[in-house]
Amino acid sequence: MMRRFPLAVALLAGALCSTPPVQARPFDEAGARQQIKALLALPFATDLVGASKVDRFAWVEKRNGVRNILAADATGVPKALTHFTQDDGTDLWGLALSPNGKTLAYVEGGDPEYPDDPSPNPNLSAFGTHQTVHLVLDGGKEIQMGEGWNPTFSPDGQMLAFTQKGSLFLAPVGGAAKEVMTVRGSLTSLQWAPDGTALAFTLDRGTHALVGVWRLKPATMAFLAPALAQDSLPTFSPDGRFVAFVREHTPLTYQSLPKAAFWNLHVYDLTTNTDHVVWTPPAGHGGRFFAPEGSGLLWSDNTHLLFPWEGSGWMRVCRVETATAAAPQCLTPDKAEVSSYRLSADGKTLFYTSNAGNVDAWHAWRQTLDGAAPQRLTQGEAMETDLALAGGSVGVMAASATQTAHPVLLAQGHTEHTPVVPELPANTHFVTPRTVIFRSTDGGEVHGQLFVPEGDAKTPRAALVFVHGGPHRQMLPAFNSMGYYSNAYAMNQTLAAQGYVVLSVNYRSGTGYGEAFRNAPDIGRQGASEYRDVLAAATYLKTRPDVDPARIGIWGGSWGGYLTALALARNSDVFAAGADFHGVHDMTRPDKFGLSPAQNKAAHDLEWQSSPVADIAHWHAPVLLVHGDDDYNVDFKESTMLANLLSEQGVPYEEHSFPNERHAFLRMQDWLAAYVWMDTFFARTLGPHTH
């Protein structure tokens, strides 16, 4: 039986959209299907990049499931650089603009998470697909450069480098690519030297990763202080003399985390071929390296290096003097996280996105490195979690409660320009999600977003808990900058439009609330402590007079699918039904090399106890299972195994698979099918909605 705990609840009625669409009456299933199709078809922008010498930006836009690349000056009208017409699941990514903004490089096909693995084929093409680097020249001519990824322009814009597995390719812009080097492993990053005579790279060999330099003349390769570690993020100093990089060692046990530091900053002098450790963090907070996705090391000049660090318990950008042993100076505000950061071309101004002042709201900021106070770049209510620089202009990706992710460009005069303004379709039923703060079963503070249907309920409503994946994610009271969670937000709005009360919960192990929250004790395989927050979300819903406590369901994907399955296995008495998208169901892992048999057994016992299948005997609530069978994130057998176990237990379930689909479904039509299945499933298992 579930224990009952008093909840300290705070409701923050954030006015995130000035005039939400009026809801006359809840949707029926046909209306819900029409709305979710229209919302999935909205333009959604991602992968914003800028040219280094001019005020020109480019980004990927997905509209009605079709991806294309747009470009615009900081105050101009966007122009389509590609002209695809099908929702076939072919991704466009890896964008790069030449310094003068006249040439675009991009990758067509493949999977950005697994770029050296076989390309996905969700559209069931007879001969499969390929991952190919393309160039779009000034004037629109397009050239296919060859299979690979990671296209990177030289500083003068005359050369293009890209990789495929362990091979490095070089090409004059407009000319043919030539393989100049091949090594065992995967080349995972490229950066040109400031004078264009060399390239730094990371070579991933699984057990370890090396930082190296390829010199064009003579054609030679060298590794920089090769060791027994994971080296990454190589970055040339402005004068090209030094390469900075991060060196990490991975702890074997979680118990060792507070006792040591597992990374340090290195600077390699290319003129003397000597390496020295610039700085090693103390044990404790920040003792393991963690960086915002797409961000790394930045030189502000030839002796000062900027890097991400959680030494205060929060993700901040800090600066260290590379020639001394002085302690680093952290630049961005404490008690706040940074999700993206860039440095101006002169190295004097830092631009970043942060949740400073409100951990549930993200905005873009600028501050000079001379100690001046941060200045917010925009004043709207939209969330801004990613940014790019182009010449003297700044571009941010913005999303609000009623607008999907879209670029907002700030010209040098700081005039805001929105090239594409997403608008909700007519007859959309939306509510303004409210931030809620409640206490977990062990007293910890948990944040979430509450979607309450408009109008008074004549009888208590069915309710749903939504759990995100990752688990290093944070849901916000707005559309998300990640396509996966932008879709989830649209679905939660559609569920509310049908009369469900929906609570999206930011459980421990997620991002946005500090390092201690992300690395909370006993999470995941170490005891599934985050489930306490999920259970507390259901308990909170039970306290609401507009919720029927017998009709609370749960849904989520990936790690959210894991938590959905865990909820149904442990508490079918609380959760009446669930929708589990590509979740993990058996958390046990193979033995760890270096641990004793007793240590491995203890780890496996804990992993098993943290697994949904450990409590399969208590599972009796119905569940919807959906999984793509070309999933590289969560093995498809996790769902086939669960279906077999549920059959043995006599638990009712509905099952669907997408042949050749990846973890995050690549085709809009597959998202639509999955959400329609879920909508119909909850209508059947949680009962009729209130009208």
Image (cartoon, helix red, strand yellow):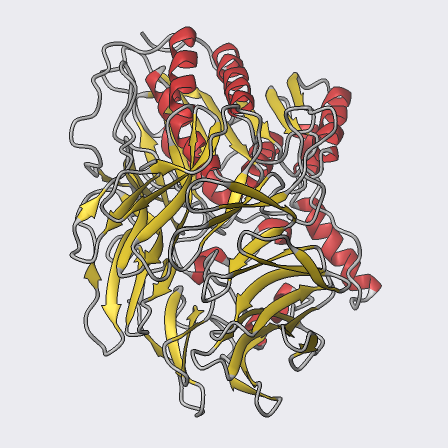
- The image shows residue 551 at horizontal and vertical percentages of 45, 19
Residue under the image location 31 percent in, 7 percent down: 691
Height in image: 598 above or below 543? below
Residue under the image location 20 percent in, 33 percent down: 17
Residue under the image location 27 percent in, 15 percent down: 426
Q: Nearer the viewer, residue 9 or 228?
A: 228
Q: Quadrant of residue 211?
A: bottom right
Q: Quadrant of residue 487?
A: top left
Left or right: residue 673 compared with residue 372: right
Residue under the image location 65 percent in, 20 percent down: 656
Height in image: 151 above or below 2? below
Q: Nearer the viewer, residue 688 or 125?
A: 125
Height in image: 550 above or below 383? above
Residue 4 visible somewhere in the drawing? no
- The image shows residue 372 at horizontal and vertical percentages of 19, 74
Residue 393 visible somewhere in the drawing? yes
Left or right: residue 538 compared with residue 630: left
Q: How many marks?
A: 0
The quadrant of the rendering that contains the N terminus is top right
Q: Residue furthest right?
A: 597
- The image shows residue 91 at horizontal and vertical percentages of 55, 37
Q: Nearer the viewer, residue 217 or 77?
A: 217
- The image shows residue 385 at horizontal and vertical percentages of 35, 50
